[in-house]
Image: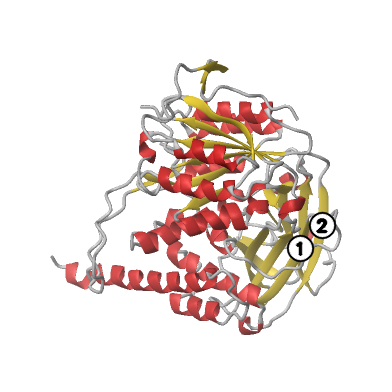
Amino acid sequence: MNIIRLRPLWLLAGGLLLPACHQQYSSEQVESASVYEMPAEAPRADAAAPLPTPPATTETYARLPENRFEDVRQTPLSTFAIDVDPASYSNVRRFLTQNRQLPPPEAVRIEELINYFHYDYPQPRHSETPATLNAEVARCPWNTAHQLVLVGMQGREVANEALPPANLVFLLDVSGSMADEDKLPLLKASLRQLVHTLRPQDYASIVVYAGAAGLVLPPTSGSRPGEILRALDNLEAGGSTAGGEGLRLAYQVARQQARPGANSRIILATDGDFNVGESSDAAMEQLVTQERKSGVFLSVLGFGQGNLQDSKMEVLADKGNGNYAYIDNLNEARRVLVQQFGGTLFTLAKDVKVQVEFNPAQVRQYRLIGYENRLLTAEDFNDDTKDAGELGAGQQVTALYEIVPVNALPATDGLPYQATEPDYAARPAASSTELMTVKLRYQEPQGSASRLLTLPVPGTDAPVDQASDNLRFAAAVAQFGMLLRQSEHRGTASYATALQLAESVRTRDTDGSRREFAELVRRAAELSTESAAQQPAVDELRYR
């Protein structure tokens, strides 16, 4: 294999790679997003050494209206792109544990909380099938007149040694905003763990960007980890942030080193604070959308707090056919980059979409919980040119629907001026016992005509305490997310009932994540109580 050897540092200028004169590694708002200013917090009475009050921040999160209940007679199809990003959960954990504050509602994406955890779904029976479809129904724990439907997808497990060669380009933000301990130092420690998992057939390059973009490590085999680690160790933070320039160079390097049968992926590690050149969401989205046609995938790792540009990084990962994770500690880095190596770095299927058709003989209304930024039109499902989500080796996708049965009161008022029986509802249902049919459409990683999987889902009125561990735990996480998000659909949900559901699960907690979740629920309950106690009573202010 011929490897192109480049000088230790090359710069991108005018779209061309030009040699620099030295090897110094360092160099001296979003549309539809909200800027979150972190409020000051009073020290807790039981804290021996209170944490310092965090400063006001300019973190950005997309404002997304919560999914509403849809009338099956008006909208019989629900369509969305899958999402396996775990970023929102680890970011929520950071707010609750490090900052001892409730997260802003915009930072809570319920589907990412649910999909952070592993569920017990069966593997595909045939090697040519990338995933299985699973479904289960039980009474909704926060509204017992409704039903809760779990839709689960399991990606095929692939042993690390059987994965195709990886062509990785580490695109690292070394600007001044990355100097904090929870940014560049944590980034370097995180990537060190990944480097030790690389195989001889895997190659890694390092591109950095600050005031300019440069290549500090040409493609280097995983059999030479020392060279990769030395390049990482030499990185320092300083200067402004030319994110667009860095992305262009990273894609150029990835294309130059592409090998037949290899999986080419850029791993962008940053706090998202781009402020030089292309920096708007629209400009970055256009750049990544153009570049993904080359077959190079883009994954994003977010670091730090204070100026975390969450909305921007999620857009880049979604448009770059990759995933987005937020790294708040080394354990999370190990989980994303080592334990989930195949899922994070190897794609089984791309443009994966789910469409659910509801049976009007059984279902009056429905609501998809989460996935607000992944919704598609009904027509998008059969359109192979429409971008959707990617499924990695061994990855899972879980979605929850809250359903209003035909014999229950509607969750929202009807439409008095609309026809009560549209033509499609008047036709006999295919099966009066089926609640719905789930359809999954996907393409091969390097492109092909899409393929289709279908699963009919029968109805049941089983109570939630008789449901599987999968549904009960997912329901507990959904309740937790609705409370943090201050959902208008949370019904009787409480932190106590969420904790009770989570602790009723019998599945072995091999990685401690479910035990950690229970602690986060307790922490949120405490903070919620403290926050409520600090609010003055309305009666006290009425006549002042």
Q: Residue furthest toward the left?
A: 544
Q: Nearest the camera: 71 or 87?
A: 87
The image shows residue 361 at horizontal and vertical percentages of 76, 70
- Tell me how far mark 2 sits from mark 1, CA to CA: 8 Å
Asked whether residue 68 appears in the rendered view, the answer is no
Give the quadrant of residue 164: top right
Name the residue beneath numbered marker 2.
453
Q: Quadrant of the N terminus?
A: top right
Q: Nearest the camera: 144 or 524?
A: 524
Q: Is residue 238 left or right of residue 347?
A: left
Which three-letter amino acid code belongs to the residue tagged 2? Leu
Q: Is residue 358 left or right of residue 287?
A: right
Name the residue beneath numbered marker 1.
133
* Cβ–Cβ under 8 Å for marks 2 and 1: yes
The image shows residue 431 at horizontal and vertical percentages of 84, 70
Q: Nearest the camera: 128 or 173?
A: 173
Q: Is residue 377 left or right of residue 32?
A: right
The image shows residue 357 at horizontal and vertical percentages of 75, 60
Give the quadrant of residue 398: bottom right
Which three-letter amino acid code belongs to the residue tagged 1? Leu
Marked residue nearer the N-terminal end (2 or 1): 1
The image shows residue 93 at horizontal and vertical percentages of 44, 61
Q: Secondary structure at mark 2?
A: strand
